[in-house]
Structures are given as structure tokens and as C-alpha cells.
Amino acid sequence: MDGHSLEEFRRRWQEELAQAQAQRRRRRLEAGDRRARRPEAGARGEQASGYLALAQGLLEGAGRPPAPRPGRADRRDATSRSRSPPDRDAAEPDEPLVDQLIRDLNEMEEVPFFDVQLPYELAINIFQYLNRRELGRCAQVSKTWKVISEDEVLWYRLCQQEGHLSKNHISDYSCWKLILQECLAKEHMLRTNWKNRKGAVSELEHVPDAVLCDVRSHDGVVIAGYTSGDVRVWDTRTWDYVAPFLESESEEEEPGMQPYVSFVRINSSLAVAAYEDGVLNIWDLRTGKFPIHRFEHDARIQALALSREKATVATASAFDVVMLYPNEEGYWRVAAEFEVQKLVDYLEIVPNTGRYPVAIATAGDLVYLLKAEDSARTLHYVYGQPATCLDVSATQVAFGVKSLGWVYEGNKILVYSLEAERCLSKLGNALGDFTCVNLRDSPPNLMVSGNMDRRVRLHDLRSDKIALSLSAHQLGVSAVQMDDWKIVSGGEEGLVSVWDYRMDQKLWEVHSRHPVRHVSFNSHSLITANVPYEKVVRNSDLDNFACHRRHRGLIRAYEFAVDQLAFQSSLPVCRLPCDTMAGYSYDLALSFPCD
């Protein structure tokens, strides 16, 4: 309470007290007039009336008790004062008790709130707004607060808020405070391994006599398609790289005549592959390696999208966009079909849309909003300004726009609201084309993008400004992703760079021959894919294994949650398949081109 508030409180208190004393004085005068009419009592009665007056004054809250009677009472008061400890501050003889109380409150710096007894449930509701550091400080106040601060409900909520063990229940562990400490220690170890390049790197086993066409990953599970028509899946969470082949129904009819794989997609339960002849195969990763559904287009599939959360697939062929998802019996059917004016370049499915799927498609200078229960609607259109990249989140969509024409405004990234269907932000003003953008995996109010001018940009969606610009690659940026403290980018020259954007510092980099087409990471792992431009298989009679290795593409899996005691070294260990030449075993800290 500051000085002004205290003076105002004192003034109001004294006014209310003066009014109350005036009323009591008026009542005493009226009572005295009534007692004056009665016969006077003896000395004993006068002494009793004095005690009664003292008790009545204390009950009524008088400012000071009546003055003590002289004689024996004075000696008794003096004796009691000699036995009692002396007062801390000598009060004035005419100072009311209320002013003394106000003066004592004025001298107090803190009110001992921890001595107040609150109901336990109410205390838990108050303490739930504190973070872990504040709970640790409160535990040092008193025994009561220590019991409240170490309640399992509070530490379980902290674990959930900080993203640790979000799928567990409060009854799974007995001490959530200890569990949170272990999670924080593991998080610190992972961050240290990321910065110091400590971990294990493995190259996923390739398909002989085939060139890599497309790679995607989801939660540590990697899918790859090759020019031989083969589709392979690896589970990097178990470090089992003897991956099964996802077979196609046409292999028995025409063996050795498989068309190239154009696109591959994967989520937690499904794997999807699109071929050059317009065939789409869908596999269920939980049931087997044979496709559960096959869909054929009349022309080549130009874009493919798979929902991360649900079993929804969208394909674009010629001027048609088709959405597929299974019914209640598990049979796949066409949920919606749309007709667009131009060939589709990019296609994405909006997450968390409820019952009906929603997709975003870019076709030249047109951006479509495709809802399953509605017709295709144009979200954005500016003549002569084609879209160059696309990404979506649950509420927004971001796409790069190439500026052409007489009035050059610079290439930008437009952010649209899916609910309002209007433009929210126009970000950047670059000379080069924006080649990649990541909105879904970025922290709130942030977005990262890559450009052909070799720079990686960090955009602040609140201020519509560029928060950071990194000169990351020698050629254009082809893939990018970020989290709360780092950025991982891939370039056309084959360089993978890891940045700490809070310090504006490059941590480390790894180089390979081919352009980086896929980058995906989480807290403990990183998946990168170098896909070659040419999809031509070298003649095995003229070229040896090393030459084919240079041109087939490369998939690497980095693991940073490895126990360092198992290596007996501060340098990381490189794990390679057994059929790879021993001369290519490089450490992650000393990674150079394999050729």
C-alpha cells in the first residue's frame, strides 16, 4: 500500500470513527439523564458502575478506556507495568487506540499472508497460476505452503503445459515433480547434443539400380519412392533399417515394368504413393504391405496431399481435384471432386477441419479453397502473379507470390485467414522467388521461409516484419523448418544447415551432392533427403558402385538422444548399413561429401 492510499484509508477511518464516537456520546448523555433521576447508590455501587462503564466502553469500541482510579489501583497498575515488557513505541497520552493501530500498520512492510488458513482446494486453485520457479520459492515460505506447492496436481499441470508426457494421466506416476525434472534434464541434454553435433547418423539402405524420386517422413517413419516403382518404409524410432517394400497390385501382371513414383506421403497409419501413369496406391501400415485401395486417374498426378491426423487423401490430375476418405465400413470413396481452370502446382489438406475435409490448391496465379460440402472458391487471384510455395495450418494459409508485370512490387508471402477468407499479412519484399514456407510447424506468431536469393527469413506475423534474415546457402533454399530455438534449412547445392536463430549463429552443416528436398525434425531426431534432378539410372556395366552412389540420392537419419556412455568418445558415431564400403564411415562432426 503506497503513501497516498494509506493517508486516504486513515482519513476515511478517522471520519467513520468520529461519527461513531459522536453517536455513542449522544447515547451516553441520554443514558446519563435517565440515571440522574434515579437515587444515588453507595460507594460500592459507584465502584461497580465504574467497572460496568469500563466493560461497556470496551464492548462498544471506545477510543480509550476510562482513566484508572487513584489509590490502590495505581499501585496495582504500576506493579503490572513493571512485570510486563516495555512498549516498543511510547504512545502519546491523548492518542486514540485506532491511531496507534494505524501507526502500527504503517510500520509493517508485509502482511504475513502465509499465516492465513485457506481451504486446500482454494489454495490449489491459486497456486495453479504459478510456474515451476515460483512454486519452488513458495515451498520455502512455510510448511503449509511446502505441502501445497508439492501437490501432484500442480506438477502434472506443469508437465502438460510444457509439452511433456501429454498423453499420460495423473495416476500414471506417483511423483510428477521428479518426472518433470527428468524431462527437463533430458531436454537440456538433447539441446546440448544438437548444438555440439553429438549423436548418431545413419544412411538408409537404398534400392539397387534405382534413383530416389521423393521422400517424406512423419514422427520418425520415413517413406521413399524410386524410379524402379519401389516404395520403401523405415521406422527410425527402432533403428530397424531393413525396411519392407510396399508392393503394388500390378507387380505380378507386369514385373519389371513399374512406372516411376511421382509422390509419396505418410502419416501415423497410412502410406500413399502416386505413379507417373496416374495410379494411386494407399497402404495401411498396421495391416500389411499390400494396398488397401487403388485409384486411377486418366492423366499424370500433378500434386498429392495426405492429412496428418485423419485418413484423407487429395490428388490433382489435369484440371480435376479429387478427395478420398473411407466410410464407416472402411471402404474408400470419393468425398468430393472439383474442377479448376489451370493445372495444380501445390496441394495441401487443412488440419482439424471436423467432419468435412478442406484443401488448399494453387494453380498458377489462382489459389482455391476446396471444401467437401461446397464448390471450389477462389481465395486469391492476381493476374500474372503465380504462387511459388504453399503451407497451411488449422486457421491460416501462407503462400509465396511472384511479382511480374510493369509495376514490380517485389516477391511476397501472403497469409490468409481461412475463416474470414481475407488477407491478413503481406510479408517480405524479396528479389528472388520464395521456394518454401513453413507455417504449420512454426511457433505461434512466427513463420520461416526460404528464397532463391539464398536467404532464410524469419517472419513476425504480429508486426508483419522480418525478424531475422540469414544468408544460409550458396544456391536457393529448397527446404526449411523451425522450432522454438533453431532453424534447419536445406539448399539446392546439397547443404543442410542448423541455426540457433536466437543467437544468429550457425551451429553446424552437412553437405551432399544433390539438392535437399526434405527436412523434418523433432526434439531428438532429424531426417534429411537429397533427391537428384535427373531420374536416369546409370549403366551398371560401365559405372561401378561408387558412381551409382553419387547419382542415386541419399536419405540420412540423425539421432541425438543416444546415450553418450555407449560410445566412449565425445565424437559421434556414424552407423551405416553393412553392405556399404568402410571408407565412407564419417563422423557427424566431420561430415563431408561422400563422393
Image (cartoon, rainbow, N blue to C red):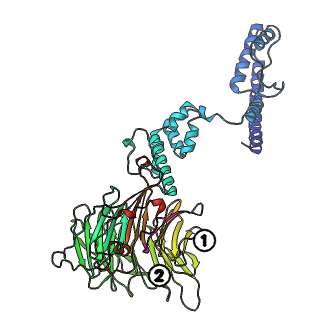
Which residue is labeled 1 in the image? Answer: 465
**Residue at horizontal 64%, vertical 33%?**
112
Indicate whether residue 48 is drawn in magenta.
Answer: no
Label placed on residue 457? none
Give the CA separation, mark 2 to mark 1: 21 Å
**Residue at horizontal 51%, vertical 72%?**
449
Q: Which stretch appears magenta?
A: 504-516
User: How many marks can you see?
Assistant: 2
Q: In the drawing, does residue 173 fall left or right of residue 120?
A: left
Q: In the drawing, does residue 359 fall left or right of residue 132?
A: left
Disc 1 on helix, strand or loop? strand
Q: Main secondary structure of the magenta part?
A: strand
**Which kind of residue does numbered mark 1 sit on?**
Lys
Image height check: is 546 above or below 368?
above
Quarter of the picture containing the C terminus is bottom left
For residue 543, what is the image quadrant? bottom left
Disc 2 on helix, strand or loop? strand
Label placed on residue 387? 2
**Which kind of residue does numbered mark 2 sit on?**
Ala
